[in-house]
Image (tube, helix red, strand yellow):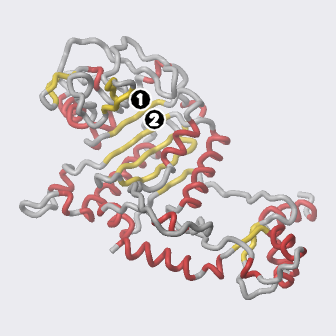
């Protein structure tokens, strides 16, 4: 049903290209000077505008807005990933006898949305990490179906995480002691990686390079007596050699296989809750591009047919588009896919006579160029206000 909804929205853009086609103002002037007088022969043929939620132009716009926050408030301090737990009591209590969570994508989406709201309240209002200067979060849906959310958090100056000794205040990478039974159970259920490595070469995380098998995530890690900064964006967390092991999937695992987590949030939400400290500036663009990478897609190949230079942005978006049941339910309910605080208002910057304008193909180019109202933009009016008003 959601695919029908999305196709209807895309059909609107496809069937109304005449109303939304656009070209740079300077481009229209240049075309007019060359003798072209029909707007139907100018501009992009099949445009998917940024007003379409989740499209490539929309994702790029959101990425640039997020980078504006980095320019204003500095690099992110924490990178948090939260994944839905289908065994949450709120989900299981609503299932009919013999019913499985994957049969109720509507229920999974509703509960995960409520958990996201609760998590954001912990971060923003209860300030568990300190005063937040800026935050973005993006909800994604993997091919396996479960929704997850990425948070990038920028803290205010007084609450910045400045040295490896303070990392342990926010993030742990060790198995809790037996007396902390609730947190210990959550770590064993959600935050143990693998088992993988030489003893489990068929694990999904194992890759081959130079005829050798290795874990793409680098597990099991090395023991580490103290937390210190690593060479890349992630620090080397404290993983002490305590001789303690736990049995997970018929394998004895120790601190080397623990995924970094925040003890308070993990105990509260009882789901996969990966928290990482961002230590260097190198990974900033990668992190933001990662969270705004867009939808999952299927890879396939069709041969034959004629090639064409016609660019159809709508077809490109639809080709290989993957929609899982939880995503369909999420979109039908109208839950938010993105959130940014504080909000960003882009100022369209352009050179003289190079602003973006809109036109329909029934207009003559003389009418378009002669219409001074169309040439007005936020930037030109900003200059005009400064010229007329000394304040």
> Residue under circle 1?
170
Tell me if 222 is positioned left or right of 289 in this view: left
Q: Which of the 4 image quarters holds residue 123?
A: top left
Please report the residue visible at 83 percent of the width from the left and 83 percent of the height from the top. 37
Q: Is residue 98 above or below residue 375?
A: above
Which quadrant does the C terminus fall into? bottom right
**Is the C-beta separation of discs 2 and 1 under 8 Å?**
yes
Q: Nearer the viewer, residue 253 or 158?
A: 253
Residue 360 picture quarter: bottom right
Q: Is residue 359 left or right of residue 90?
A: right
Q: Residue at the location (77% across, 67% down)? A: 24
Residue at far bottom of view: 362
Q: Nearer the viewer, residue 133 or 324?
A: 324
Q: CA distance from mark 2 to mark 1?
A: 7 Å
Dot 1: within a 10 Å radius of its alpha carbon, few (fewer than 14), some, or many (20 or more) residues? some
Where 386 sits versus 4, above or below? above
Q: Residue at x 75, y 68 (%)?
A: 356
Q: Residue 237, how many percent across, how many down?
A: 40, 21
At 33% from the left and 28% from the top, the residue drawn is 215
Of residue 292 and residue 134, the one placed in the foreground of this image is: 292
How many numbered tags mark residues here?
2
Looking at the image, tell me whether mark 2 or mark 1 is earlier in sequence order. Answer: 2
* Residue 129 circle label: 2
Give the label on residue 325, or none: none
Instruction: State the image coordinates of residue 240 (x, y, percent, origin top left).
Output: 31, 14
Which image quarter: residue 52? bottom right
Q: Secondary structure at mark 2?
A: loop
């Amino acid at each position: 049903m959601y695919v029908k909804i999305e196709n209807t929205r895309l059909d609107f853009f496809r069937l109304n290209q005449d109303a939304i086609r656009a070209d740079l103002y300077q481009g229209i002037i240049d075309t007019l000077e060359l003798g072209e007088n029909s707007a139907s022969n100018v501009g992009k043929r099949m445009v998917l505008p940024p007003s379409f939620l989740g499209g490539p132009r929309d994702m790029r716009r959101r990425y640039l807005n997020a980078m504006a926050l980095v320019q204003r408030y500095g690099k992110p301090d924490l990178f948090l990933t939260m994944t839905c737990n289908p065994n949450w009591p709120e989900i299981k209590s609503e299932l009919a006898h013999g019913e499985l969570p994957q049969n109720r994508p509507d229920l999974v989406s509703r509960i995960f949305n409520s958990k996201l709201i609760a998590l954001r309240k912990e971060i923003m209002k209860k300030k568990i990490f300190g005063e937040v200067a800026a935050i973005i979060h993006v909800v994604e849906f993997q091919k396996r179906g479960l929704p997850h959310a990425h948070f990038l958090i920028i803290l205010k100056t007084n609450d910045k995480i400045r040295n490896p000794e303070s990392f342990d205040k926010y993030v742990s990478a060790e198995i809790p002691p037996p007396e902390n039974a609730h947190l210990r159970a959550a770590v064993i259920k959600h935050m143990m990686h693998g088992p993988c490595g030489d003893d489990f070469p068929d694990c999904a995380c194992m890759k081959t390079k130079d005829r050798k098998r290795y874990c793409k995530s680098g597990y099991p890690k090395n023991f580490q007596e103290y937390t210190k900064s690593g060479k890349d964006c992630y620090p080397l967390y404290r993983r002490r050699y305590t001789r303690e092991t736990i049995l997970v999937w018929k394998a004895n695992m120790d601190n080397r296989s623990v995924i970094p987590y925040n003890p308070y949030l993990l105990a509260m939400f009882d789901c996969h809750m990966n928290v990482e400290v961002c230590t260097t500036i190198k990974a900033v663009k990668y992190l933001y591009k990662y969270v705004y990478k867009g939808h999952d897609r299927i890879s396939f190949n069709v041969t034959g047919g004629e090639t064409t230079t016609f660019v159809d942005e709508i077809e490109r978006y639809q080709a290989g588009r993957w929609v899982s049941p939880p995503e369909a339910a999420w979109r039908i309910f109208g839950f938010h896919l993105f959130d940014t605080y504080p909000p960003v208002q882009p100022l369209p910057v352009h050179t003289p006579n190079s602003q973006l304008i809109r036109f329909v193909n029934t207009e003559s180019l003389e009418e378009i160029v002669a219409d001074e109202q169309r040439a007005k933009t936020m930037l030109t009016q900003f200059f005009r206000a400064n010229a007329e008003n000394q304040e």
